[in-house]
Image (spheres, grey):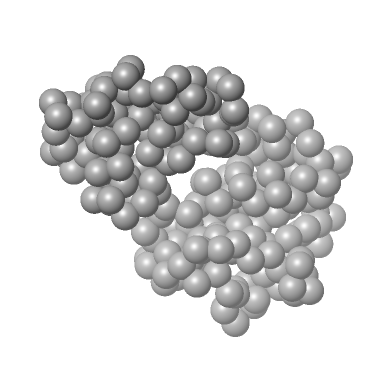
Amino acid sequence: MAITNWPSAERPREKLVSRGAAALSDAELLAIFFRTGVAGMSAVDLARQLLNDYGSLRGLLNASATDFCKHRGLGMAKYAQLQAVLEIATRHLSEQLERQDCLTSPAQTTNYLRARLRDYDYEVFACLMLDNRNRVIAFREMFRGTVDAASVYPREVVKQALADNAAAIILAHNHPSGVSEPSQADIRITERLKKALQLVDIRVLDHIIVGDRVTSFSEKGLI
């Protein structure tokens, strides 16, 4: 049955307007994005099939252009639109964070770093540069590595922090394995960076590891 024939309260667009976006399922949100289905399938049916094929919303959003466009009813225009939506969401998180003190909005800080780092299939080490009021100056991807390691050079971190005129830093990196617990190597490099940055009066506020979950050195008493 076409969505236009559904009861008004069950149609995704009307449901969003009356109850808010959070009330919608992943399939319903995707259906609004797709706007139309394909022959024999409503937009919601199409969305459900794709979520089933990819295993999750994240799996679908991470699909390559070639893989995405193999599905009936999808093409490069839809792929480009979806990537644009993802980038808008990331920039929205960034703008929210820039207006606030990172220490008073840890959830937003975590959400932003998760959005930036979680989907790499190799390690990325990054720094969130902060001013003297702990507001974001810039997000810097500093080093990239293999699936299980990244070479981190304290001198380069100090150099970039001084160039950004940072007063404080939040360190962050991802674990492609999905395990977010810090390794001994993570703990050692954090100490090295903390000591190097102390020499130029720059504070290290936290080190965030992004995996299937997010781990904070600060919350674990490791910094």
> In the picture shown, does residue 157 fall above or below 184?
above
Q: For this rendering, which residue is in front, 72 or 114?
A: 72
Residue drawn where x is 70% and y is 49% of the image: 107
The residue at the far front in this view is 7
Name the quadrant of the C terminus.
bottom right
Q: For this rendering, which residue is in front, 198 or 37?
A: 37
- Horizontal and vertical percent position of residue 117: 50, 52
Q: For this rendering, which residue is in front, 202 or 213?
A: 213
Name the quadrant of the N terminus.
top left
Image quadrant where residue 156 sits: bottom right
- Horizontal and vertical percent position of residue 195: 76, 68
Decide if residue 54 is on the left or right side of residue 148.
Answer: left
Residue drawn where x is 71% and y is 68% of the image: 217
Residue drawn where x is 78% and y is 58% of the image: 205
> In the picture shown, does residue 70 fall above or below 54?
above
From this viewpoint, is residue 196 visible?
no
Decide if residue 201 is on the left or right side of residue 120.
Answer: right
Decide if residue 199 is on the left or right side of residue 50.
Answer: right
- Horizontal and vertical percent position of residue 43: 29, 28
Q: For this rendering, which residue is in front, 114 or 3?
A: 3
Image quadrant where residue 83 sits: top left
From this viewpoint, is residue 72 visible?
yes
The residue at the far top in this view is 4
Decide if residue 6 is on the left or right side of residue 8.
Answer: left
- Horizontal and vertical percent position of residue 74: 20, 30
